[in-house]
Amino acid sequence: MDRNNIEKIAQSAEDRLLLAKLWDKINAGQRKNIPSHTCFLSPREQEMAKYLFGDMEGLHAFGGYGDAERKMLIYLPDYLEESSLYDEDSPCVCLRAAFFQGDSPSHRDFLGALMGAGVGRETVGDICVDAGQCDFFVTAEIAPYLLQNFTSAGRTRLHLQQVPLTDAHIPEPEVKVIRDTLASLRLDSVIASGFRIGRSLAGQYIAAGKAAIDGLPCEKPDKAVAEGAKISVRGLGKIQLAAIGSRTKKDRISVVIHRYV
């Protein structure tokens, strides 16, 4: 764990500023032996933080539930158990917005409304929309403000309440299962198969910097994709290379791809 690594990891001035803030927050907690936490981080930001902090004892990536995409870094001193992340005084809070089930606000509607309410993206974690309700995660500092002021998403009226993290409702993602065979596990091949587009067009998305593997931007069309990896492409959506099977008689690789709908 070395602060000097910030310069090696950061790819921009914004990265350096973020990593410096993360360092100051976590280092202060470790030095004083008290809990400390950061804002919510994107998968890419989490990867940078992983390189910065390494396997630091007591440091947890936590987003309110097990498979959260956006997570905070939380330092717990040795006198606190990991289960305390779910306690009432957790720095991560779950808010539930109930609405008329006949309405169908989307993730984009909720995110836009939250930003319109004047909160920063870094204070908001995952947004989990289901029929008639949406559970979303925010920092404890911003929760009281939202409980008083977040009343609508688009034209949909909301009724907000705070719920225990252990009671958060995370809907199962809807996926389309695609079974295919590929000549290789190159990124452009997997994207072409998952989104049913030509490989040359997939390569254009990658070259334009619109593709990411597990949150990390990738501009290499020949990058090998591992089983379980999630790939997002701006303008197309998200897929996962769910399974890699055996080779066919024509020496192609059997794959199962999940496309999130």
Image (cartoon, rainbow, N blue to C red):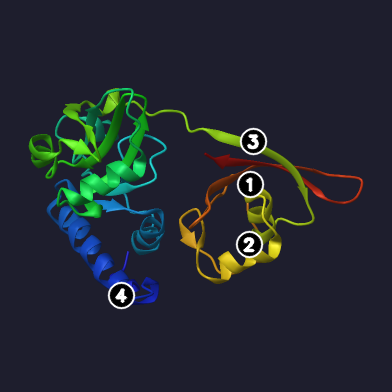
Q: Amino acid at mark 3?
A: Val
Query: How many residues crowd around disc 3 within 10 Å: few (fewer than 14), some, or many (20 or more)?
Result: some
Query: How far is disc 3 from disc 1 in space, using C-alphas?
Result: 15 Å
Of badges 3 and 1, the one in the foreground is 3
Mark yes or no: residue 38 visible: no
User: What residue is shown with label 1?
Assistant: 227
Mark number displayed over residue 204: none
Whether the residues at callouts 4 and 2 have beta carbons within 8 Å, the answer is: no
For the residues labelled 2 and 3, the Cα–Cα distance comes to 19 Å
Residue under the point 25% across and 35% down: 85
- Front label number (4 vs 1): 1
Q: Amino acid at mark 4?
A: Asn
Which corner quadrant of the image does residue 176 belong to?
top right
| 241 horizontally vs 234: left or right | right
Q: Amino acid at mark 1?
A: Glu
In this view, the residue farthest toward the right is 249
The residue pinned by badge 4 equals 4
* Among the two numbered marks 2 and 3 on one chain, the one whose residue lies closer to the N terminus: 3
What's the amino acid at mark 2?
Answer: Ala
Residue linked to disc 2: 202
Q: Which residue is mark 3?
A: 177
Residue 48 shown left or right of residue 229 in the figure: left
